[in-house]
Amino acid sequence: MTTYHDVPADLLIGELASRLQDIEDVSPPDWADYAKTGSHRERPPVQQDWWHVRSAAVLRKVGILGPIGANHMAQQFGGPKDRGVKQNRAVAGSRNVARTIMQQLTTSGLITSKHNLAGTVNLGKVLTSEGQSLLDEVAHSVRPEADDRHPGLSNY
């Protein structure tokens, strides 16, 4: 069976974003229309479905990098900040966007918190079985398109 590790990220995220639109718990908050996605951006996103695309990307990154927290997730979506005449510096993306999306994915049952053996320290978010099956199902559905675009994938 095809997993989310086997297909390109752009194909997986596009299809996963359309499936996340059907989930009620994953929806943009009121402030998402005018909020920037990081201090390195000059304007808010112009796409109408940017919240669902970012949610799909976060879900994929939790699967690949988990356990991962909101701070590290914001760093994954950062970029270079234009500081005028001075050299650019790397800055993190919006922690509020990352945290809110991870809270919505937790509420929908796609990710959950992982704790240490004593149960006292939260190590970050990991996929649940529902999240794993959703990612694998989407990966399986986009596999033929991935094979057409990248013929070398058929070897795997």
Image (cartoon, rainbow, N blue to C red):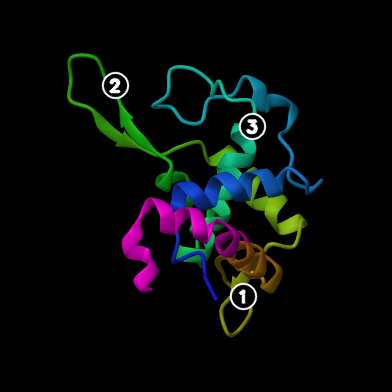
Q: Amino acid at mark 2?
A: Asp
Query: Can residue 37 be seen in the rendering of this structure?
Result: yes
Q: Is residue 26 left or right of residue 13?
A: right
Q: Amino acid at mark 3?
A: Asp
Residue 98 in the figure: left or right of residue 83: right
Please name whichever residue, 8 or 61, is drawn nearer the observer in this view of the structure. 8
Judged from this view, the residue extending furthest toward the bottom is 117
Q: Is residue 131 above or below residue 107?
A: below
Which residue type does callout 1 highlight?
Thr
The nearer-to-camera label among 2 and 1 is 2
Image x and y of residue 45, in percent: 54, 24
Residue for badge 1: 120
Q: Earlier in the sequence, mark 2 or mark 3?
A: 3
By secondary structure, the bulk of the magenta-drawn segment is best described as helix
Is 117 above or below relative to 5?
Answer: below
Check disc 3 and report its element: helix, strand or loop: loop
**Residue stretch rendered in magenta on the structure:** 138-156
Q: Residues within 10 Å of mark 3 (few under 14, many from 20)?
A: some
> Which residue in the structure is indicated by mark 2?
82
